[in-house]
């Protein structure tokens, strides 16, 4: 049935599309870089994450250090060759191992894809630079406010009742956040200056709202960990495989999702990480026929069309339909253009991330280049 319907749509029954969100997106990005995965799939969808982020791909030696941390938590001896250690860990229950890793995300000791073996031989940005990846069609994208909830987890002031940010305290929190992720203080100050520049100018005209401060703090985390790694990953792919030879499409979800019976998040959190999943899998998100349900159906159709043909379907209906154009053009312009996804309001946006990702973050994220 599946093969018949793929063929009816004009696709190749042998085609395979892999997709994932967050950690799943990072894994998809790693498989695109893996020589062992060559020819096993023809299309990939990366939703909010790529292995080019600093904290989500690491060397074997670094990963082994994390293994030692886990071993000590479950009372395993750490020997020089880790032989006894691994034998001990193999006998531990899944429950015990999961319990030992509670809090690892905030402590930066959580497990991530490893490079330096046969699965992922090269550090991701080096593999991209050298063009050593599998040439496939790609959809990649993010939500409007990827980092708001994550930033709040490491910056208690963001969710402290009645805490009022100033330019000085916002700068202090940005520096705190960046140094927490092992960035040099010099880099942390550059990040604070970049993200607070607009607010400093506006402060001479009107008072800065607390929501504006919190949105900026969320943007720092989101751009650093999710948005720019995803955007820059795909742009590097485009440079080496040729924008004309393969299809690359980008999106940015601009519509928040409020689940029935669940209290809405603070307005400054916006369209948080993972909300695209509410639209791609039918839930009790909205009643039949509402604009949000229509957005869900449009996204499902576009993703399905991409999986079958390599090109997402038009969004909207009738005379208001909008073609989803390729993310990058040929020549020297590899800045991402994306489909703005919002209920009943679809359109292409050019060069939104040019100054943020390409000019500011890329020199920091792709330092090995």
Image: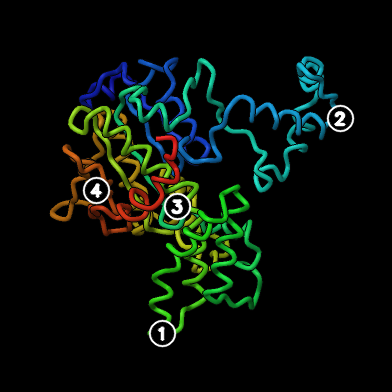
In terms of depth relative to the viewer, which is nearer, 99 or 147?
A: 147
> Could you give the CA–CA distance between mark 3 and mark 2, rounded to whole angstroms?
38 Å
Whichever of callouts 4 and 2 sits on the residue coming sooner in the sequence is 2
In terms of depth relative to the viewer, which is nearer, 235 or 294?
A: 235
- For marks 4 and 2, give the one nearer the viewer: 2
x%, y% of residue 189?
51, 60
**Residue topped by disc 2:** 75
> Could you give the CA–CA distance between mark 4 and mark 3, rounded to whole angstroms?
27 Å
Numbered marks: total:
4
**Residue topped by disc 4:** 315
x%, y% of residue 251?
32, 47
x%, y% of residue 270?
46, 62
**Residue topped by disc 3:** 223
- For marks 1 and 4, give the one nearer the viewer: 1
Left or right relative to 213: residue 312: left
> Could you give the CA–CA distance between mark 1 and mark 2, rounded to whole angstroms?
57 Å
Which element is circle 1 on?
loop
User: Residue at point 38% right, 35% down?
Assistant: 45
Q: Which mark is residue 206?
A: 1
Whichever of callouts 3 and 1 sits on the residue coming sooner in the sequence is 1
């Amino acid at each position: 049935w599946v093969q018949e319907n793929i063929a009816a749509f004009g696709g190749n029954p042998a085609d395979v599309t892999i997709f994932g969100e967050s950690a799943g997106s990072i894994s998809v990005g790693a498989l695109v870089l893996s020589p062992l995965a060559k020819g096993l799939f023809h299309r990939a969808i990366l939703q909010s994450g790529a292995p080019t982020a600093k904290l989500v791909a690491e060397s074997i030696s670094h990963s082994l250090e994390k293994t030692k941390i886990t071993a000590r938590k479950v009372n395993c001896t750490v020997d020089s060759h880790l032989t006894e250690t691994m034998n001990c860990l193999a006998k531990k229950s899944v429950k015990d191992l999961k319990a030992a890793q509670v809090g690892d995300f905030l402590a930066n000791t959580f497990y991530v894809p490893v490079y330096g073996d046969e699965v992922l031989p090269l550090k991701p940005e080096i593999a991209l630079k050298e063009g050593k990846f599998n040439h496939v069609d790609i959809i990649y994208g993010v939500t409007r406010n990827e980092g708001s909830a994550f930033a709040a987890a490491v910056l208690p002031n963001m969710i402290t009742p009645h805490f009022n940010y100033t330019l000085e305290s916002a700068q202090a929190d940005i520096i705190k956040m960046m140094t927490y992720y092992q960035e040099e203080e010099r880099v942390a100050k550059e990040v604070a200056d970049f993200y607070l520049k607009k607010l400093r100018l506006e402060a001479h005209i009107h008072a800065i709202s607390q929501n504006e401060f919190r949105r900026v703090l969320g943007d720092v985390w989101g751009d650093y960990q999710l948005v720019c790694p995803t955007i820059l990953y795909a742009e590097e792919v485009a440079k080496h495989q040729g924008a004309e030879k393969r299809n690359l499409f980008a999106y940015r979800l601009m519509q928040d999702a409020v689940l029935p019976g669940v209290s809405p998040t603070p307005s400054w959190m916006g369209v948080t990480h993972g909300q695209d999943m509410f639209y791609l899998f039918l839930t009790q998100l909205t009643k039949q026929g509402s604009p949000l349900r229509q957005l869900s159906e449009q996204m499902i159709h576009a993703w399905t069309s991409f999986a079958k043909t390599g090109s997402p379907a038009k969004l909207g209906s009738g005379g208001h339909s909008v073609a989803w154009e390729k993310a990058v053009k040929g020549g020297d312009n590899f800045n991402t253009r994306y489909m703005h996804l919002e209920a009943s309001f679809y359109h292409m946006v050019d060069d939104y991330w040019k100054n943020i990702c390409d000019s500011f973050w890329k020199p920091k994220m792709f330092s090995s280049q």
